[in-house]
Image (cartoon, rainbow, N blue to C red):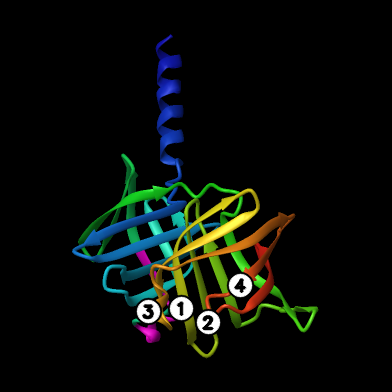
Amino acid sequence: MKSVFVLLNLMLISASAFTQVSVSGSWSIQEGTMNTTWLFQDGYYSCTQYDVANKVFSYTKGGAYSIKGNELQMHLTFHTGQKEKIGTAETAKVEVKNETMQLTVNAKTEVYRKLDDGKSALAGHWLITGRMNNGTMQTITPGARRTIKLLTGTRFQWIAINSETKEFFGTGGGTYTFVNGKYTEHIEFFSRDSSRVGASLSFDGKVEGNNWHHSGLSSRGEPIHEIWTRGL
């Protein structure tokens, strides 16, 4: 009987050793009026600092990520604050408990509160693959120059970049809802035009397989019809 208990304890210890930390979803910390928000979805992440009250965009960075044990490994595809870091890797010690995410980098620890768990019909790492032009849907093949849309359970961010030239063309983000085929964005930061902060935009949306059809009026009031593809 004693050997059975020993075996069970060893199995429990072994199982706990291989338990993977999950950071999927969105997390945020606020200092004064400045927010720092992380999005993690389908192996891709972004971290953005912004001030909604004063309509200030500070920086955004992101790329692919993975977790090994309690280590968050991040591979930077874009970084508006430190362009020279694009193409490099960053690591952080991560601990998730009680609806918080604790990140430790260079002995500095920050604690973020959970905003959502990354679950919704639109949650994903999307790339634009089609856009209507003069009545014809034109195919867009993602390469080094790409437009990304990252959605968690409640938050969104789009990022336009060129990973080879390290160019950054713009970003915007905030919260969203998707109800009865109506997708609505509530903008909290916009790198190219701070006057857009506080605005809400509604679009018709439907998901067919890995494609998201997105149509309506852009932030400039222009008609758009786009196709975004998940998982490329």
Residue that badge 2 annotates: 161
Residue that badge 4 annotates: 217
The magenta region covers 82-91
Q: Position of residue 9 (x, y in %)?
A: 40, 24
Label 2 is placed on what type of residue? Answer: Ile
Dot 4: within a 10 Å radius of its alpha carbon, few (fewer than 14), some, or many (20 or more) residues? some
Label 4 is placed on what type of residue? Answer: Leu
Residue that badge 3 annotates: 194
Q: Is residue 114 left or right of residue 109?
A: right
Q: Nearer the viewer, residue 60 or 201?
A: 201
Dot 3: within a 10 Å radius of its alpha carbon, few (fewer than 14), some, or many (20 or more) residues? some
Q: Nearer the viewer, residue 90 or 174?
A: 174
The quarter of the rendered structure image containing the C terminus is bottom right
Sequence-earlier tag: 2 or 1? 1
Label 1 is placed on what type of residue? Answer: Phe
For the residues labelled 3 and 1, the Cα–Cα distance comes to 21 Å
Magenta span contains residue 84: yes
Q: Secondary structure at mark 2?
A: strand
Q: Are marks 2 and 1 in contact (CB under 8 Å)?
A: yes
Dot 2: within a 10 Å radius of its alpha carbon, few (fewer than 14), some, or many (20 or more) residues? many
Q: Secondary structure at mark 3?
A: helix
Q: Nearer the viewer, mark 2 or mark 4?
A: 4
The quarter of the rendered structure image containing the N terminus is top left
Residue that badge 1 annotates: 78
Q: Are marks 3 and 1 in contact (CB under 8 Å)?
A: no
Q: Are marks 3 and 2 in contact (CB under 8 Å)?
A: no
Q: Are marks 4 and 1 in contact (CB under 8 Å)?
A: no
